Image (cartoon, rainbow, N blue to C red):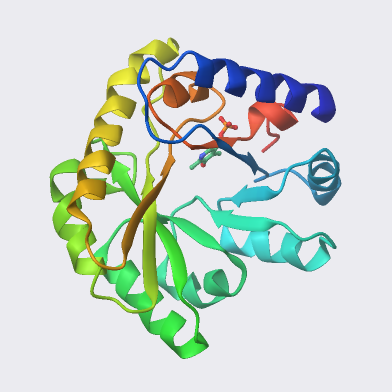
Amino acid sequence: MILENLAQVREYIDCSIQKRTKNFGFNEVKLIAVTKNHDIYAMRKAIDAGINVIGENRVQEALDKYESLERTVEWHLIGHLQTNKVKQAIKIFDVIQSVDSEKLVLEINRVATKLNKIQDILVQINVAREESKFGIEYNDVTAFIQFISNLKNVHVCGLMTIAPHYNDSEMARPTFRKLYEIFDKLKQQNFKNVEMKWLSMGMTNDYKIAIEEGANIVRIGTGIFGARQY
Ligand SMILES: *Cc1c(COP(=O)(O)O)cnc(C)c1O
């Protein structure tokens, strides 16, 4: 199934790029296979079918898989990160997409300095201000990015959001549009050490709309691997 699902997802991604009514300045979309709760066999299949970026939510789960996966891929952390897990996270993740507080980003900078790494991050934004979700408040984003721009071992390369879940994905469109607006504004502002390159928005339920609104990273689990068993 993974092969067929992937082919379909890729086709939808291309269609959604075609459907854009606006020029966002980029035409490629990076597909992240979200492998939380899926085993290493499923991961190997996806990678053999061309997946080269993996998204995981939990550091421990990712570590276990990282050690048994004999394939080279890019690893993105997309779930909330606790400060006591930062060291392990920095060792395996190429990008931490879920940076959502000053305390966390300071710890990332501290540990990255020690490990002599410049850690790529995205800032997670809670656009719809949902209580149940992590992320910086929309109105605080610029100040937060300015704060990070002074940290030498952290490199901001974009923004991430999780839209509220709607049965009709069309309802998520304003959330995505709003995130693109601030992404574009931050790009114009050109803060030092800050690159507005990646806009990570859209999951199985809503990635088509997200792409139409400017996403250039989508994070897809169910659409590739089927429903997760918990
Ligand atoms: C689980 C998860 C995804 C993937 O969700 P699907 O609905 O299975 O595609 C994407 N992003 C984040 C942050 C997630 O936690």
Identified at 62% across, 18% down, the residue is 12
| Residue 49, quarter of picture | top right
Identified at 33% across, 69% down, the residue is 105
Q: Nearer the viewer, residue 62 or 202?
A: 202
Residue 76 can be seen, yes or no:
yes
The location of residue 137, given as percent across then percent down, is 20, 45
Q: Nearer the viewer, residue 197 or 210?
A: 197
The location of residue 117, given as percent across then percent down, is 50, 80
Q: Is residue 181 left or right of residue 99?
A: left
Residue 6 higher or lower than 82, as above or below: above
Q: Is residue 95 left or right of residue 132?
A: right
Residue 127 higher or lower than 108, as above or below: above
Q: Quadrant of the N terminus?
A: top right
Q: Quadrant of the C terminus?
A: top right
Residue 128 can be seen, yes or no:
no
The location of residue 204, given as percent across then percent down, is 57, 26
Residue 113 higher or lower than 91, as above or below: below
Identified at 44% across, 82% down, the residue is 111
